Image (cartoon, rainbow, N blue to C red):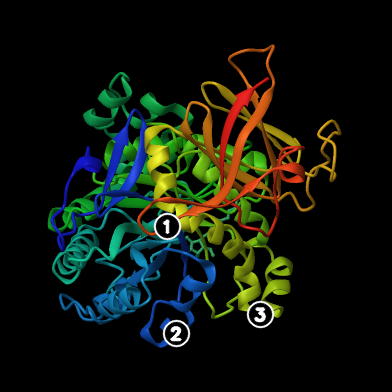
Amino acid sequence: LALAQKTPAGVHPIPSIAEKDGRFALMVDGSPYLMLGFQANNSSAWPATFDKVFPAAAILHANTIELPVYWEQFEATPGHYDYSNVDAMLVQARAHHVRLVLLWFGTWKNGSSHYTPQWIKQDQQKYPFLVNKDGDTVDSPSTFSPARLEADRHAFAALMRHLRTADPQRTVLMVQVENEAGVWHGIRDYRPEAEKEFAGQVPQKLVDALGKQPGTWRQVFGDAADETFQAWCIATYIEQVAAAGKAEYALPLYTNAALRDPINPGLPGSYESGAPTDQNVQFYKIAAPSLSVIAPDIYMPEYAKYMAVIDQYKRFKNPLLIPETGNAPIYAHYVFAAIGQGAIGFAPFGLDLTAYSNLTEGAEAMGDKSAAGPETRLAPFANEYALLEPIASRLAQANLEGNLRGSSEDPNAHTQTLDFPRWQVDLSYGLPAFGNWIKPKGNNPPDGGAVIVALGPDEFLVTGHHVRVDFTPKFDKAKKRFFLVVEEGNYDASGKWQMKRLWNGDQTDYGLNLIANANYLLRVKLTTY
Ligand code: N0T
């Protein structure tokens, strides 16, 4: 395991993803790393905008920034790669003591191909769009374009080759290949080359991996044949781009998904087709082994949907990474559930200081916040990250070891339980000042959450916001929880626990109150009576 790896001073191993019994960690400089990130707005990754991007990291207490690399900028002239934007990002990131995740806006950006260079946009014979069932040309790239695939592979390989030499410090931790690939306004490609392939046999690799009988796409996949075909075409294309880059520099690579509704997905055509949506994750895993992660972009504020998406993207040995989530305040508390579910990273979208108002959440919510200024929009996330960032690596390590639990408030259940071998953790939201015998009424808005790390069988590290935490012994039903000692403190730079004070009296008699905007880190030792 990479954990045990001793690295000579000044030498930084390439970031990687470690696995232990189906749990994952992003390894950075030989240690587990929890990415508490944010993504800049789409047009913010220009040197002229950097003063509105990098300072946001400190305000947010974020340790990582996700920034696009635009193919149109990177290869404005065919075969000539311009590294100036990327180099400027590396300089800025190091100066601001943050890491980067780069997003390759190549062939796909949100199902279209708007980031392809002008010389591609102007030669639609050579670099064709997709044609849908009605014969309409759709604003989405056809995968049947060997020339575009070649160009994308070469450009992406050049980017990765450059990073290998320009970034021995490993400022860049991961690279996203394409952005929300898929098709809007069409289910699959009906260009002649596509039709020919669709009429043929499903590739052996796919039927074998699924344990299905060979046959045509229609025979093997029935009603889902069209969208499955499109998913396979896109995933296969992305794999070739990813593999070309990975051969140059083996950073962890991933691709991201615009989701369909996880509970009521609706009919094909109502969501991005051929995308790595939940029903296609498995196909992407089979087609694209160079991708370490298939990652959901979660723009659904409802608790049940958020958790359903997380469950879906943890299947097929897929590490959980949430590279985009909404930036309305309610999304901030989902960082607790994400960590509780083993996420290697979490990043709200569009939280730079340009105060650009992205309308995905609805104009109303975003409008209110931009009126109040960009810092105000950052505040709910800054509040959570300020609590979690100082222990981020510890949380990532605990997750890899299976010693972490956590959750976010569910507006429909004002209590939640988390299970450790000997103890159940009881979380209550919206309890009055005294009285743990009263029914909690929930917070308004429902923005609480907690993460708990087992330090030993009867000892826990406890933190969170807007929640009361208590424990119930599982090992002897006749016994009750008795706090042996509750220390508030923090870990110093060398990783040593520094106790500031003991909690007792009102601070423990009714459970542990983790106040909404206070940052408490508690070490709790339990016994029974
Ligand atoms: C995201 C962002 C950016 C059922 C939107 C979200 C980013 C891209 N797309 O601001 O454009 O580059 O990845 C798509 C959300 C679809 C909503 C579907 C709701």
Q: Are marks 1 and 2 in contact (CB under 8 Å)?
A: no
Looking at the image, can residue 252 be seen? yes
First reached walking from the N terminus: tag 3 or tag 2:
2
The residue pinned by badge 2 equals: 51
The amino acid at mark 3 is: Gly
Residue 316: where, in percent of width, then height? Answer: 38, 31
Q: Are marks 3 and 2 in contact (CB under 8 Å)?
A: no
The amino acid at mark 1 is: Asp
Q: Residue at x 83, y 41 (%)?
A: 441
Element under disc 1: loop
Q: Residue at x 30, y 57 (%)?
A: 174
Q: Residue at x 67, y 25 (%)?
A: 481
Q: CA distance from mark 3 to mark 1?
A: 34 Å
Residue density around tag 3, few if under 14, some if 14–19, many if 20 or more, within 10 Å: few
Q: Residue at x 38, y 34 (%)?
A: 401
Element under disc 3: loop
Compared to residue 55, the image places residue 157 above or below, namely above
The residue pinned by badge 1 equals: 492
Residue 522: where, in percent of width, then height? Answer: 57, 46
First reached walking from the N terminus: tag 1 or tag 2:
2
Residue 181 vs residue 267: left or right?
left
Compared to residue 404, the image places residue 448 above or below, namely below
Camera-nearest label, 3 or 1: 1
First reached walking from the N terminus: tag 3 or tag 1:
3
The residue pinned by badge 3 equals: 373
Residue 465 vs residue 347: left or right?
right
Residue density around tag 2, few if under 14, some if 14–19, many if 20 or more, within 10 Å: some
Quadrant for the C terminus, please.
top right
Q: CA distance from mark 3 to mark 2?
A: 16 Å
Residue 378: where, in percent of width, then height? Answer: 60, 69
Q: CA distance from mark 1 to mark 2?
A: 31 Å
